[in-house]
Amino acid sequence: MSMRVFIAGGSGFIGSAITQALLARGDTAVVLTRSVLAARNALGDTVELVEGDPTCAGEWQKAMASCDAAINLAGESIASRRWNARIRQIIHDSRVDSTSFVVDAIANAPEHSRPSVLVNASAVDFYPFAEDLGAHTAMDDDDPVDERAPPGSMFLSRVCRHWEKEALLAKQAGARVVLMRMGMVLGDGGALYKLRSVFSKFVGGRLGHGRQWMSWVHMDDVVRAYLAAVDSKDLAGPVNLVAPGTVRNRDFAKILGKDINRPSLLPAPAFAVKLALGEFAEYALNGRRVVPAVLEGAGFEFRYSDLSSALLSLEP
């Protein structure tokens, strides 16, 4: 049976792919956007568009009353600008405030017609870096990090904790809540486009020592996992949305270089990465070996579990 699915952030990099997948299977996508014109150009004529700002209460919240499910992907990009106090606040508030208003909309919708599930974006940055995990547990760098691992204390970890805490309030309105802790999403655009651009100029290589783990996931699997979260009553709580084939940064650089026939011989020293990225550099120079334990336990089968096949499918 077809569904009406409300999507905040439905015209973005990930949201547009999910929107198109919903339409392809016969569902109705109700997309919240700040610009109807831009969203119409991006998504086409078959999408229902609602204009509004997800970080503010508004008429858009009433659109949820007729929807069976809600997906919340709203949030400012974390890597588009160097961080200062103002940008950190924007990163935090764009996620937490939008989630708060989405939850309010679910709670205020008529009980008989409100969304029964909220699938809310989060990130693997919820977890501490591998070295920090090891400092407080018996874990070492190679140990997998599943959904039971404790939260970290750095900035993005705190953002994810607040983000998820806000989303979980939807349970009080009777909604099933799924928290999608995503790794780096590989698709036609996004981070992969930027990385390929760097490597194409023969200046690609590992970052720092290159031993840090990188959690990635193919866009096709992201879309399929979000739809599975909407459909499956067995999925709830935190879900690590990462491919099983986590790799270290040095290996990621080698595989990407091979994929576009470019060498990966020019590593970026840690000091240069910090100079270029500021505070965000810590997230490029550190990582953790996150595994999709909940998804695999639920029987979800990844189409792309190794990096080489994932990159091959996304060749320009």
Image: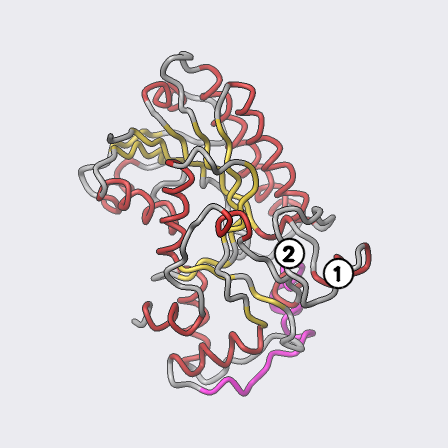
Residue 312 lies in what quarter of the image?
bottom left
List the single residue furthest toward the left: 45
Q: Which mark is residue 145?
A: 2
Left or right side of 268 for 68: left
Q: Is residue 77 above or below residue 144?
A: above
Residue 183 included in the magenta stretch of the image? no
Q: Are marks 1 and 2 in contact (CB under 8 Å)?
A: yes
| Rendering colour mode | secondary structure
Of the 4 image quadrants, the one containing the C terminus is: bottom left
Give the residue at x 32% y 68%.
Answer: 313
The majority secondary structure of the magenta stretch comes to: helix
Residue at position x 38%, y 29% from top?
Answer: 69
| 35 on left or right of 267 | left
Range drawn in magenta: 263-281
- Front position in the image: 137 or 119: 137
Callout 2 crowding tier (Cα within 10 Å): few <14, some 14–19, many ≥20: many
Q: Which mark is residue 139?
A: 1
